[in-house]
Amino acid sequence: MPRFLHTADWQMGRSYSRFDIEDGAALVEARFAGIEKLAELANEHQCDAVLVAGDVFDAQTVSDRTIRRVFNATKGFEGPWVMLPGNHDAALAESVWTRALRLGAVPDNVHLALQPGVVPLEAQGLAVLCAPLTQRHTYGDLTEPFSHYETPDDLLRIGLAHGSVQGLLSDDIDATNPIALDRAEVSRLDYLALGDWHGTKQVNERTWYSGTHEAERFRNNDAGNALIVEITGPGATPSVTQVVTGRYQWHQWRETLAVKSDLEELLDRLEALPDASVVDLRLEGAVTLAGEERLLEALSVAEARFRSIQCDRSKLQLEPTEDDLSELHADGYVGEVIGELRQRQQEQQSEEARDALAILASLLKGRAQEGGQ
Amino acid sequence: MILQSLRIEQLRQFRNPFVLGNLQPGLNLIHGPNESGKSTLVRAIRAAFFERYRSTAVDDLRPWGDSAAAPTVALEFENQGELWRLTKSFLQRKRCDLTIGTSSFSEDEAEEKLAELLGYQYPKRGASKAEHWGIPGLLWVEQGTGQDLEQSVEHAGDHLKSALNSLVGEVASSGGDEVIEAVRAQRNHILTGTGKPRGEYLQLDKDRLAFEQTIGELKERILRYQEQVDRLGKLTREYERTEVERPWEDAQRLLDEAQARFQQVLQLEQVQAQEKATLDQLQQSRRLLEQNKEYQENLSRQLAARKLDLDKAEADLQRLELQSPATTERLRAAREAYESAEQRMKQARLREARSRLEQDVKRLEQRAQQLSQNLAKAGEYQQQVENARQQARENRIDAAEVKRLKVAEHQLNEATIRSSAIATRFSWNLEPERSITLNDDALQNRGEQQLLDESRVVIPGVGTLGITPGGESLASTRRKLATLQQTVSELRASLGVDSVTSAENRLSDFEKAERAQQHAQELLKSVAPAGIDPLVVEQREAKRELENATEKLATTPNSDTSIDVPDLATAEAAFEQTASALTAAESDDQKHRTALMAVQQTRDTAKAEWQRLVDQEQSPERQQQLKQIAEELVAIEQKTKALEERLEARSREILEARPDLLKQDIERYQSTIRNLRQTQEDRGRELRDIKVRLEAWGAEGLDEQLNEQEAELERCNRRYQELHRRAQALELLLTLLTEKRQALTRRLQAPLQRHLDHYLSVLFPHATLEVDEHLRPGTFTRGAELGQVTELSFGAREQMGLISRLAYADLLREAGRPTLVILDDTLVHSDEERLDDMKRILFDAATRHQILLFTCHPEKWQDLGVPPVDIQALKA
């Protein structure tokens, strides 16, 4: 009863521009750790093989170190790995794969499907029909030859491909590298393991996108999983189990604060998130000076707790209350300036005015506190 | 605030306690001469407030030479209903005590109270300076500084403003200026004075550019990397395909075929060339045979020609031999004629000579005869000449002398006649026998005599008579006459004649003889031109010649009379003619014989030639040869024809094989193979190169670098945007704060302006003085005048300064702040009229403030309406 692990889109070598260096490095590390996790899971679920459906590497010219580390990370699982070149790491004349081979970084149990064709894993009862990308983009269906690949009857026909299933996915996915929706059926595949879509997605009972093993963007598409596929024999319906591999959860929230409870709710939600979170907040609406202070405090706490939290408050207006103002002791012309800034903020939606108000408030607050001491 | 009393001790010249008490709430005029301690009092008040009691910088307070002194100032003043007592000692005894109502303060606390009350600061260390003096600095005017307002206002600034704040009921913002400064500091941290980025903000902007550039370069390199990868893919496919197809092998096969065919053609061409050579040889042989044949055939032609030559020579010889007798005959005849002509010419010459001799003899005979005759005549003529010469000798007379005589006689005659005409005629008729003498000449008878000279007549018996002819001409005539007579007689004498006639006769005879002689001489000359002697010689010569000629003739033979002898000229002409005829004949004969010999020679030669050829032609070898040649020619002809046919056929074959194209094909295939191999090798090399290059580039991890750089850029951008927003916010904030603050200041200016206008209307009606944003008097206008206070005259500035200070005092008073005005000898530069105005102003101000006016000119201020306090009097 062959069982294998289906994963894809590791995108190794990618770095994270939107985060601070430290956070970005940690997220990169997580992707390496994710591979180790896959190996662990493969062992844990007694998988016969691991199939990687393309985009192992994010680019052709990643560093030697990245290449070595990727293959090092597979060591936990000693069964066969089949890696398929995707659009990011296409099997060109000179590619990340040829470099890996030259470096001697590829372990014997890792099969690189650099040519279209069948990788027979007889011991595992699998015949892996591979459709590697040998160009950066193709406009024809590379899985079409699957129909002509003859495999021993006693082996499962497992397709391994990278591209977008036609008529299924939104326009976000490249229109290049198309794959026929009925490929599994037409080519008599027991299972078609796909890559390119970073979220876990079932196309039909024999066709799945595993998604990336570790999320790397905020688009919430159910990333950070792998699939354990079990097929009792040729022709049998596969049993697919989704397992979590990702470490970090990525959250992107767009919130509008109108009343006091909005802020409270937001803070509660933040608090509820696990530590291994990457959060991107964009706030709109208005907040009192006291509210802003509370928000900043909460963000400060979150920064320490989460892997990363970013908060865009430029659209969040400051609305000082009378209490706020009296607390600031903003008398005389300084008080007039505050009024002017509030007015500008409201009437002109001026970010400058908002920032200026925040600066002034913090200055006055500092002074008030000094005075109070 | 009303100062009530001032007490000082051990302070400068006031070694002993001195009290200035009983000070009034309004004006107090305190006066004393110089050195009286007026300024010391002012100094004491200032020291009491401004100087720290523990200050070591107040040595000036010490009485001169008293190092043990403890200068002390004690003040009492009322403020808002409370009495303030201040006692401050310096130097030796440093103390400060203050009681306010019932509360007591001392030391620093006391000093802080005072500073707070009046609005000034203490120096951190050392003596108090103008910048510490605050409001008192404005209201307490030191001697000679009344006009310098700006500094004082600036030092009093904050105190003034706080006073104003409370006055206009406006909050100037507590610490608003601090906020402004804080904002400005923050802004200046990011931006320069002119609003340009600085520091990190600026660096980020530069970094962004640097990152963008790096990214651009990386992208460029990645692009090149990808191009190289693509190139590698393409090349690899081509290389492998080529390795499989091995297209150069096809080319090689084609090349081999072409070369084989070309080789065949080459062989054909070789055979062709050999046969062509054979053909050439055949043709050469034929040419030789033909030449031989032609030679043989030539022999007969030559023989004929020789025969013709021989015949001609024979004919020539015969013709010449026939001509020979005629030629010989002509020669003999010519010789005969020549000899005959020669004979005749000799005879003619002989006869010619004889006849000439005969003529000579005859001529010579005649000549001899002639000469004899001439000689006879010559003797005769010679005689005649002698005779004539004798005759001439006898009658020789000079013809010219004769002529002269003749002329002289003629003249004498004329003179005699003339003298007798003029001479005194003396005539006489005497008795016979009787005589008289005239001039000793005895006169008788009768007679007449002309007297020309003084003459004497002696008459015997009678005496003597003197006669003197008269007239002058008589004398000259007499002289001339005498001269002429002299001349005539002399000529006669010389000529030897007695008269002219005889002379002329002689002359005629002479001339006749002369002529006869001449005639005879000419005759002589005609017969004997050279004289008689040569004639004799000539005659002798002629006789001898005659003898010779006669002898020669006798010896000359007579010519042959038998021969008809022509004259000599004819004979000579005939001889000449025959001589040339003979020469011509001889020449002809010579030529003829030469021609004959030449022709004989020619004939002999021709004959020999002919004979030789005849012999040759007739030889049997030649016949044999001719036959052989003909046979060989036929054989060669046949061979040539066969050969030519073969050549023609092969040539067509070669042409059809197109060896030029074959050659080109070979080159083409070779080139193709070379190119194909070269291309493949190049491909292999490029493949290796690209691989090496890509390996190197790949190892750099360009994409990862790009990722990182892009991340850096984004971070940089993010930070930049943050700073940018912050800069803009700060800029906005600063602008707003500054604007609001200025607006406030303008509101605060209003009350000060009001008080200022109050005093100004007294001093300069219709003038205005505007207060600027720093609460300083600024623009001054009076009628058409417009300018700053600082531009006014010293006096006017002092007056302006004072009214401004009074205005500040009013303002402070309104704000409930203590005001004490101290003026130390002020307004010394004001004229009488302006001083009067100022007095009114001071009096007016004194209704609101206590004013202490110190002066050394009390008389100027006596109309101030207050009793003056004399320091000197107080001292006493």
Image (cartoon, rainbow, N blue to C red):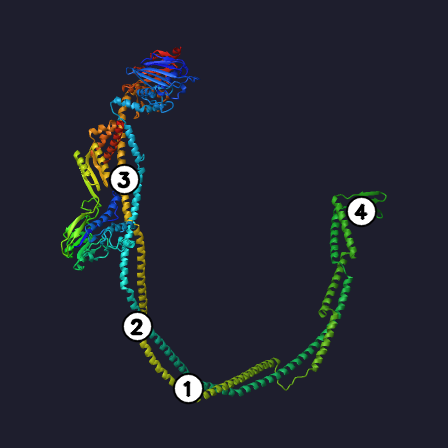
Q: N-terminal of the two: label 1 or label 3?
A: 1
Quadrant in which the C terminus of chain B is drawn: top left
Amino acid type at circle 2 is Ala
Callout 4 secondary element: strand
Marks 1 and 3: which is nearer the front? 3
Image quadrant for the N terminus of chain B?
Answer: top left
| Residue, disc 2 | B657
The residue pinned by badge 3 equals B719
* Front one among B13 and B789: B13
Crowding at mark 3 (Cα within 10 Å: few <14, some 14-19, many 20+): some
Question: Would you name the residue on which mark 1 appears?
Answer: B625
Q: Which mark is residue B574?
A: none
Q: CA distance from mark 1 to mark 3?
A: 128 Å
Q: Chain of mark 3?
A: B
Q: Are marks 1 and 3 in contact (CB under 8 Å)?
A: no
Dot 1: chain letter: B
